[in-house]
């Protein structure tokens, strides 16, 4: 447990070094509410006026075009539970797509110390924080297409509650995720089931009336979120994609997603 808290402290320090603060975003919520949210569109929108930013939407044709891109550097599968062995922190502030061959739609991922550094060499920012198991364009399309992907992952977790871990990973892969990305989602789900089960069995609402996270999501955020973020790399907040979970605009990063289609 001591190692976990040290890991969490190092993670928070690295994120604070990369995060751009916006003093005028206090209290404003970013998301696309649905029946699970607990808020409505008058309280939470996919637009952060304080940042002059709105969540980008993609057509089915655009998402299919992104799925056609081939990642040339392999993202390794997870061979052990990262919640038992918290990973070392990568100090990179940004993960970007570097096009290798636009005609054959080949690309690789690269870490940068800033957005300016990435754009200076023609790289396309895909999310803030270091690249991880969910940083591919294929995994991005899952986040972009399904605003409530977390609900589908939870359904997989419940369906496979007493099943082998590999069954849970396969269920999450069937949602469209790559295997390495599905693995960290699965480890996250199992960790949350172990530590937050009694809370989550009673609370399914994402946001309370004041905009704060519901009890289940808050438990997941505190006890499973730090490792997930460090391993997955991509989250919806650091990718600038609105989801059915409403988040403070101050937590959301601006990412333009101007990929060649």
Image: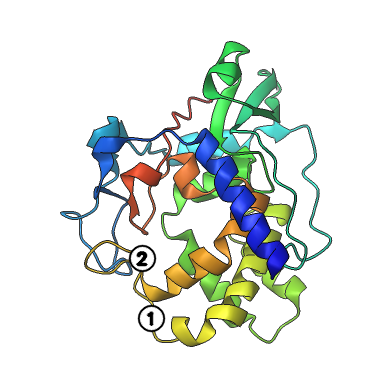
- How many labels sit on residues? 2
Q: Image point 60% across, 53% down: which residue? A: 9
**What's the residue at 51%, 69% (across, down)?**
220
Q: Compare residues 261 and 181 and report the one nearer the observer.
A: 181
Q: Point out the residue furthest to the left here.
A: 42
Q: Which badge, 2 or 1, is on the more N-terminal residue?
A: 1
Residue corresponding to mark 2: 213
Residue 137: % across, % down: 60, 38
Q: Within the image, what quadrant is residue 174 found in? A: bottom right
Q: Which quadrant holds residue 156?
A: bottom right
Q: Are marks 2 and 1 in contact (CB under 8 Å)?
A: no
Q: Is residue 95 above or below residue 219?
A: above
Judge left or right: residue 211 versus residue 19: left
Which quadrant holds residue 8?
bottom right
Residue 120 percent across, percent down from the top left:
58, 12
Against 237, is 50 above or below? above
* Residue 75: percent from left, percent from top: 77, 44
* CA–CA distance in space, label 2 to label 1: 11 Å
Q: Which mark is residue 254?
A: none
Side (left or right) of 146 relative to 67: left
For marks 2 and 1, give the one nearer the viewer.
Answer: 2
Q: Classify mark 2: helix, strand or loop.
A: loop
How crowded pointer 1 is (Cα within 10 Å; few <14, some 14-19, many 20+) is rated as few
Q: Is residue 202 left or right of residue 44?
A: right
- The residue indicated by pointer 1 is 203
């Amino acid at each position: 447990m001591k190692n976990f808290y040290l890991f969490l402290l190092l993670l928070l320090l690295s994120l604070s070094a990369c995060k751009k603060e916006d003093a005028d975003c206090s209290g404003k919520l970013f998301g696309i509410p649905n029946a699970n949210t607990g808020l409505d569109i008058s309280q939470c929108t996919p637009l952060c006026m304080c940042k002059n930013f709105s969540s980008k939407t993609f057509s089915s044709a655009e998402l299919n075009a992104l799925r056609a891109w081939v990642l040339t550097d392999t993202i390794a599968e997870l061979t052990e539970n990262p919640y038992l062995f918290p990973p070392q922190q990568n100090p990179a502030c940004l993960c970007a797509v570097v096009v290798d061959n636009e005609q054959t739609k080949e690309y690789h991922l690269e870490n940068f110390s800033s957005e300016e550094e990435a754009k200076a060499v023609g790289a396309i920012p895909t999310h803030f924080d270091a690249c991880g198991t969910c940083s591919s364009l294929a995994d991005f399309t899952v986040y972009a297409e399904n605003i409530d992907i977390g609900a589908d992952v939870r359904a997989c977790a419940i369906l496979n509650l007493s099943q082998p871990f590999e069954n849970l990973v396969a269920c999450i892969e069937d949602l469209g995720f790559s295997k390495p990305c599905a693995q960290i989602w699965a480890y996250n789900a199992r960790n949350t089931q172990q530590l937050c089960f009694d809370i989550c069995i009673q609370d399914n609402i994402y946001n309370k009336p004041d905009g704060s996270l519901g009890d289940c999501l808050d438990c997941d955020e505190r006890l499973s979120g730090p490792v997930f973020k460090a391993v997955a790399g991509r989250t919806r907040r650091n990718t600038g994609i609105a989801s059915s979970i409403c988040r403070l605009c101050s937590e959301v990063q601006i990412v333009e997603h101007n990929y060649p289609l």
